[in-house]
Amino acid sequence: IHQKMGKFILIDLKKREEKKKLRELCHEIVKDFSEWVRNYEVDDDTPPNEEECAALEEAKFEELKAAFEEQAQHLRRITTLVEMKTLDTYAALDMRRGYLYRRFADDVEELEEQAGRMLTHCVKTLETKVSEVSDMLPMTEAQIGEEMEQLKNVLAGWIETNFPDGVGGLDSYDDELPDGTPSYSEFLESVGAAEADLMEKNAAAIEAEVAEAKEEYSTMLKAKVNEAINKAVEEIIQDIHEDAQEEFDYLDEDARAELLETLAQEVKDYGASRLDE
């Protein structure tokens, strides 16, 4: 009888030890998560945004649960209680979702506002650049490409200088922006679309410029040719008058004057027929 009682007492003591161990495990897992949230340090100058915080918390939950289950599996005398307490502990953890983001929310909101202001500036800068390039058309396609590439480089450099972690950091805070404000990736797409539109406008400008140049040069060449014809006509008439005394010495003065007038008129008529109106 004493041996049996001793055995029961020993089993009871071990159960109590396991229950104590389980209470400690349940407490520790929640405590560890709270300490992790409190002591979490960012690797760079930007705190995690809401989506990143949720992913970080999920990874931490999985880590803590795995550690909890590894130790709880050895509490074989209280398996039913372990199952109940596991559910309760996991529920307690789940209630703490969002704690990490709550810690950084003010900083995140400030950075989101800064991202919105900077992207608004990028949009206005693009509008100004498109207007400037449009005024310079026509130009080569390479020149248009250089103008737009320069725009992207200048803005990227500005972002790198003025936003924590530069373009990479900005990309993490451009998901919650005011209506009408594009994310950075959407802004880059709009730069590409603006460049394509400028290329189309440039092609039309080149066509119009070439047509205008052709017309101007045609008018100028016609004027030069007409000028040359008129000058040649004048010179020929002058030569006829200079040579008339010798060439037509057999005519009296009136007949010679009549002939000269006839010849001069023929030269003028011929020259006129070659003029381009």
Image: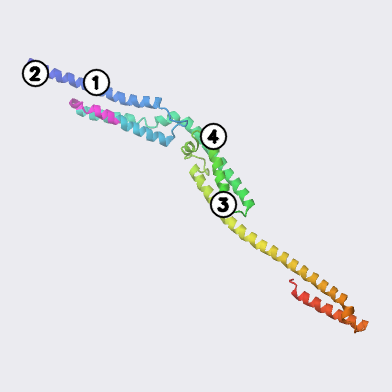
Image quadrant where residue 26 sits: top left
Q: Nearer the viewer, residue 215 or 73?
A: 215
Disc 3 or 4, which lies upstream in sequence? 3
Q: Residue at x 10, y 17 (%)?
A: 5
Residue 183 seen in render: no
Q: Which residue is mark 3?
A: 142
Q: Nearer the viewer, residue 109 or 184?
A: 184
Callout 3 amino acid: Ala
- Height in image: 145 above or below 269? above
How many marks do you count on the picture?
A: 4
Do the residues under discs 3 and 2 have CB atoms within 8 angstroms?
no
Disc 2 or 4, which lies upstream in sequence? 2
On the picture, is 187 further left or further right than 100? Answer: right
Callout 4 amino acid: Thr
Which residue occupies the extreme front position in the image? 246
Q: Which residue is mark 2?
A: 4
Magenta-drawn stretch contains 109: no
Few, some or many residues within 10 Å of mark 1 (<14, 14–19, 20+) = few
Few, some or many residues within 10 Å of mark 2 (<14, 14–19, 20+) = few
Residue 104 seen in render: yes
Disc 1 or 3, which lies upstream in sequence? 1
State the CA–CA distance, disc 4 to disc 1: 55 Å
Callout 2 amino acid: Lys
Q: Which residue is mark 1?
A: 20
